[in-house]
Amino acid sequence: MPSGRLALIMGPSGSGKSTLLNVLGLLEDADDGDVWYGGERVTGLSRRGRSRARGRYVGFVFQSFLLLPSLTALENVVLAARYVGRNAPAARRRALELLAELGVADRRDHYPAQLSGGEQQRVAFCRAILNDPPLLLADEPTGNLDDVNGRVILDALRARARAGAAVIVVTHRADARQDASAVFRMHNGILEQEECP
């Protein structure tokens, strides 16, 4: 998918949407075919190679947040920098900027259990974009959120696309179609493009 685009993948539960994202994000192996990031074939890389490629190319926003409970919000965000060997003070400064942009800077020293679902997802979003990945994958990022927090995350995803990232979002939300560059529907593992909204 070209950079600067927002693509939605919609479809019933069990149709393969999350599996597709996991394959694109190198969390699962494909049954067939290859995954390329830019000019680099990443299919078949070692576990360490896949981790490096993910850290360099991919940000992943999960429905269930997946924050480490023993780390504060700030520490969870900065954790992403370790995968790419980024300078720790610079990563901390950028993490604080992102937490401020998403309205949770005042929660930086709180642990996930002390955060609401909306706050946890905002922190998880900051972690996903800390390294400014060219590809951002979001698997039902608003599924556990109320409408207000859901709109915050959708707006943040749109902003990443406007900033030049390729953004792929699995969602059931009809309002996510606003500003989408492409909408795909998945059924029984088959992905088909719908007419652009």
Image (cartoon, rainbow, N blue to C red):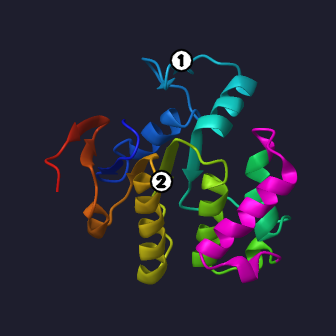
Q: Which image quarter holds the N terminus?
A: top left
Q: Vertical placement of 129 versus 15: above or below?
A: below
Residue 49 image offset from top left, x and y in percent? 70, 24
At label 1, which amino acid type do we have? Arg
Whichever of callouts 2 and 1 sits on the residue coming sooner in the sequence is 1
Where does residue 94 sit, x and y in percent of width and height? 72, 60
Residue 129 part of the magenta segment: no
| Left or right: 52 in relation to 174 | right
For image coordinates 50% across by 33% down, the residue present is 23
Q: Which quadrant of the figure contains the C terminus?
A: bottom left
At 56% across and 56% down in the image, what residue appears? 62
The one of 44 and 160 positioned closer to us in this rendering: 160
Residue identified by numbered label 1? 41
Q: Is residue 93 magenta?
A: yes
Q: Which residue is mark 2?
A: 139
Residue 142 is left or right of residue 183, and the answer is right
